[in-house]
Amino acid sequence: MGHEMKKLYPDIIQIDYATAARESEKQLSPLVSDLGIGFIVHRPFEASVSFSVSRGNRISEWAHDFGCTSWAQFCLKLLLSHPTETCMIPAISNYTHMDDNIHAGFGPLRDQQTREKMAHYIEHLGGEGR
């Protein structure tokens, strides 16, 4: 995919990118940043894999320090705070979740150190690489 982006040089790309499967961040973020390409996050909940990881686990108390009161907000804020992400399409199937998702856009976005702490927390719950 990197070769195509360098050759075609699109204005923006849309990629499936979820907290439980962050390969896009590791592989594509540096490239889109270098090329100045916009990055739309699609399917951040990866068909609810993120929620199966969090099921039965309470959100960490330190997540409340930056406005997260749910797992959806935690996951979305982790992805939204990455400097290469331009916007996000949560692709929800239940409109009642929309209000919860919207709240992830409020409050401060996280710095790299906090993003790593958030990602490590999800990995610890068993979510990395699913």
Image: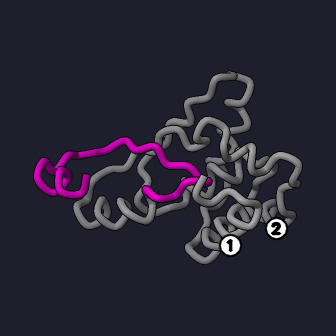
x and y percentages locating residue 105 in the rendered image: 62, 47
**Residue 7 colored in magenta in the image:** yes
Q: Please count the marks in the image.
A: 2
Image position of 77 (left or right of 57): left
x and y percentages locating residue 89 in the rendered image: 50, 36
User: Is 112 in front, or is 49?
Assistant: 49
Image position of 51 (left or right of 130): right
User: Is 71 in front, or is 21?
Assistant: 21
Q: Which disc, if any, is residue 117?
A: 1
**Residue 78 colored in magenta in the image:** no
Q: Is residue 128 above or below residue 8?
A: below
User: What is the magenta range?
Assistant: 1-24
Q: Which disc, if any, is residue 62?
A: 2
User: Is 33 in front, or is 47?
Assistant: 47
x and y percentages locating residue 92 in the rendered image: 62, 28
What kind of residue is marked 1? Lys
Q: Is residue 7 above or below residue 111?
A: above
Q: Looking at the image, do the residues carrying marks 1 and 2 touch, with CB atoms under 8 Å apart? A: yes
Disc 2 secondary structure class: helix
